[in-house]
Amino acid sequence: MTLRRSWLKVAVLTVLVLSLVLPAAAGAQSGILAPTDGSVLKGTVQFKANFPGAPYVRWDLFVLPGGDDNKKIWIASGKDPGEATLSLDTTKFPDGQHAFSLRLVKRDANYDEQIVRFTIANAAPAPAAKPALRDIVDTAVAAGNFKTLVAAVQAAGLVNTLKGAGPFTVFAPTDQAFAKLPAGTVESLLKDPKALSNILLFHVVPGKVMAAQVKDGLTATTAQGSPVTFSVKDGVASINGARIIATDVEASNGVIHVIDTVILPPAAAPAPAPAAKTGILAPTDGATLKGTVQFKANFPGRPYVRWDLFVLPGGDDNKKIWIASGKDPGEATLSLDTTKFPNGQHAFSLRLVKPDANYDEQIVRFTIAN
């Protein structure tokens, strides 16, 4: 059995002919025995074929790159009947689909041909494409252990916010973290979207902060507006005392770090009590009055020394009627019988008198309709 190089030189194939020639067994299968049609090959493989001899005088083996007979590469030939085994180095061919052509040649140079198709796959398989990342909300839903957090985000009206472009860094309390809150807290918060939103936004830091960026003493301003402080002790990171138990869960619009405790923003400073309104409290300007009504006014005291109340019939200051006066700071209430005045438009004049007898005046117009 002889070997020679293909003059086509499409690919140089190293072929080791073991030339195992066996007597043809009666009824033995003729042609290519291995590999089988449709095989996937890589590295060095064993090619086996059985040549029946008469009526054939020779066999020729070719590789057809891409299955194209016009590009065939001669591999080996032989004349002795029986089985032949060859070791084929498939790395000499490009990966892809090819074919073997075994031709059993007759005396008149005609031949019978067997085609066996195969695929060469020597290159490492391409890494599987990573699944597309979900946004922060859908990532939390898919995780399965943030049911309370997801319900809270929905109740607070923050779903669209956390599905936005971001990026956001979310410190996500687990269901167990919410369960550590006092009984009834979660239920109460779910009924108070404003308070709930305030707490949830305290768990969000604008931008993308990965675990490697967290250092002991690092501070960051949350989307709620208040700062949070990180600590790292013995390799364990915490945020405002809540331990970070899982990190760098990436989402399409940011990253999630898992925490074991719900963190609460600083209690808002109580709003200052509104300054007591000075002057006429009731009736309001433009009111319609009848019967006996309650007149209320607040006298601030300093820098005033006295207050005087008048009714201006028809709104005419020249016709003013004195009603009452006082010196003590605070609220004064008077019962006023409007039937003592004619129906129509009138006005109250409250004068806050200073030590020099000048005064500041408030006018409240009203209509009597008895």
Image (tube, rainbow, N blue to C red):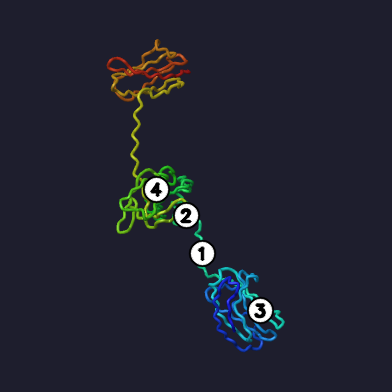
Badge 2 element = helix
Label annotation for residue 103: 3
Badge 3 element = strand
Label annotation for residue 295: none
Amino acid type, residue under disc 1 in the picture: Ala
- Residue underneath mark 4: 205
The disc, 1 or 2, on the residue closer to the chain's N-terminal end is: 1
Q: In this view, does 240 lie to the left or right of 167?
A: left
Q: Do the residues labelled 1 and 2 touch (CB within 8 Å)?
A: no
The disc, 3 or 1, on the residue closer to the chain's N-terminal end is: 3
Amino acid type, residue under disc 3 in the picture: Arg
Amino acid type, residue under disc 2 in the picture: Thr
State the quadrant of the N terminus. bottom right
Q: What is the spatial separation of the Cα atoms under label 1 and label 2, in whole angstroms?
A: 26 Å
How many marks on residues? 4
- Residue underneath mark 2: 139
Query: Image quadrant of residue 322?
Result: top left
Front residue of 154 and 166: 166
Give x and y (percent) for residue 314.
Answer: 44, 13
The disc, 4 or 1, on the residue closer to the chain's N-terminal end is: 1
- Residue underneath mark 1: 126
Query: Image quadrant of residue 176?
Result: bottom left
Q: In this view, does 206 lie to the left or right of 102?
A: left
The disc, 4 or 3, on the residue closer to the chain's N-terminal end is: 3
Give x and y (percent) for residue 293.
Answer: 41, 22
